[in-house]
Image (tube, rainbow, N blue to C red):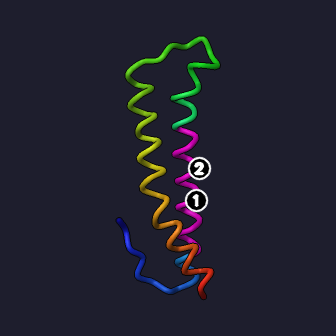
Amino acid sequence: MFEIRTDDPARLKRIAYAGGGAVILGLVILLYNVFGPLVTAASYSADNVVFGLFGVIVVLLATHPTNQAAQKLDDS
C-alpha cells in the first residue's frame, strides 16, 4: 500500500497521530451507520450501507501507514 520513507521522529509521530485519528473516525462512521439504525427508530437504507463501507475503507487505508510509523518509532 503506502510505504513510509522517512526516519524523522517528528514526522513519524504526526503520521501515527493522524492515522490513529483516521482509524477512530472510520470506526465511528462504521458503527454509526451499521449499528445506529438498530438502536434508534430509523431504518436501514442504501445510504447506511454506502457510508458504512466508506468507514471500512477509511480504516483499511489508515491502518498500514499508522502501523509502519509506530514500528519505525519503536525501532528508533
Q: Quadrant of the C terminus?
A: bottom right
Residue 32 is situated, as x and y percent measured from the top left of the image, at: 57, 31
Residue 63 is situated, as x and y percent measured from the top left of the image, at: 49, 59
Q: Quadrant of the N terminus?
A: bottom left
Residue at x 58%, y 59% (from the top left corner): 20
User: With respect to residue 8, does 14 lie above or below?
Assistant: above
Residue 13 is situated, as x and y percent measured from the top left of the image, at: 59, 74
Corner quadrant of residue 18: bottom right
Q: Residues within 10 Å of mark 1 (few under 14, many from 20)?
A: some
Task: Name the residue type under label 2.
Answer: Ile
Residues under labels 1 and 2: Cα distance?
6 Å
Does 15 appear in magenta? yes
Residue at x 51%, y 13% (from the top left corner): 43
Residue 63 shown left or right of residue 40 in the figure: left
Task: Name the residue type under label 1.
Answer: Gly
Element type where label 1 sits in the image: helix
Question: For the stretch drawn in magenta, what is the main secondary structure?
Answer: helix
User: What span is colored magenta in the figure?
Assistant: 13-29
Q: Residues within 10 Å of mark 2 (few under 14, many from 20)?
A: some
Residue position marked by numbered label 1 in the rendering: 20
Callouts 1 and 2 close, C-beta under 8 Å: yes
Residue position marked by numbered label 2 in the rendering: 24
Corner quadrant of residue 38: top right
User: With respect to residue 36, does 24 lie above or below?
Assistant: below
Residue 17 is situated, as x and y percent measured from the top left of the image, at: 59, 65
Residue at x 58%, y 55% (from the top left corner): 21
